[in-house]
């Protein structure tokens, strides 16, 4: 327990949660296995779920109302937001896109692999 009235249960296996709270009213559940979520909250009202496996999302929020989902595997997205309303999706594998936005309304698309594009947009 990392503070007054804060729980840290740890459960291992698919469909099992591991919530860890780093402060009052802040949850950090971690679940291991495909289709299992791992939300982690780094502040009041801020979620950071992480899911491992194809077709599984890993959203991470670095501030209030900011999401950072990350998905690992071909055809899987990894959006990351570094500020309010700013997305940074990254996809790993051939024919998979990796857009990254480094500011409000700014895109940076990057695709890795043969026959894959890498275009970056600076500004709107």
Image (tube, rainbow, N blue to C red):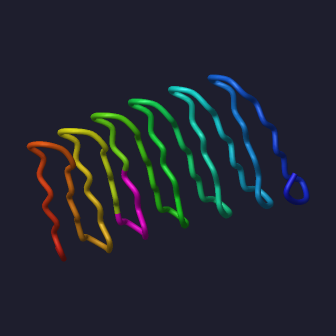
* Outermost residue toward the top in this view: 14
Where residue 11 sits in the image (x, y, percent)?
76, 30
In the drawing, does residue 45 fall left or right of residue 59?
Answer: right
In the drawing, does residue 96 fall left or right of residue 13?
Answer: left
Q: Which residue is drawn at 30% across and 45% down?
A: 91
Quadrant (top left, top right, bottom left, bottom right) of the C terminus: bottom left
Q: Nearer the viewer, residue 53 or 84?
A: 53
* Outermost residue toward the front in this view: 114
Where residue 122 sits in the image (x, y, percent)?
18, 75
Q: Residue at x 37, y 48 (%)?
A: 78
Give above or below for 69 relative to 18.
Answer: below
- What secondary structure prevails in the magenta region? loop
In the drawing, does residue 19 fall left or right of residue 7?
Answer: left
Give above or below for 80 relative to 19.
Answer: below
Q: Identify the magenta region.
A: 79-86
Is residue 84 inside the magenta stretch?
yes
Residue 43 position by quadrant: bottom right
Q: Which residue is drawn at 71% across and 50% down?
A: 27
* Outermost residue toward the bottom in this view: 123
* Outermost residue toward the right in this view: 4
Q: Which residue is drawn at 69% across and 27% down?
A: 16
Where residue 88 sits in the image (x, y, percent)?
34, 59
């Amino acid at each position: 327990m990392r503070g007054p009235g804060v729980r840290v249960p740890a459960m291992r296996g698919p469909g099992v949660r591991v919530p860890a709270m780093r402060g009052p009213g802040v949850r950090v559940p971690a679940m291991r296995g495909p289709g299992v979520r791992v939300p982690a909250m780094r502040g009041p009202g801020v979620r950071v779920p992480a899911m491992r496996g194809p077709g599984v999302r890993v959203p991470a929020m670095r501030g209030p109302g900011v999401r950072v989902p990350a998905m690992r595997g071909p055809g899987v997205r990894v959006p990351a937001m570094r500020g309010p309303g700013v997305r940074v999706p990254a996809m790993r594998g051939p024919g998979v896109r990796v857009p990254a936005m480094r500011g409000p309304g700014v895109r940076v698309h990057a695709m890795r692999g043969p026959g894959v594009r890498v275009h970056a947009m600076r500004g709107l």
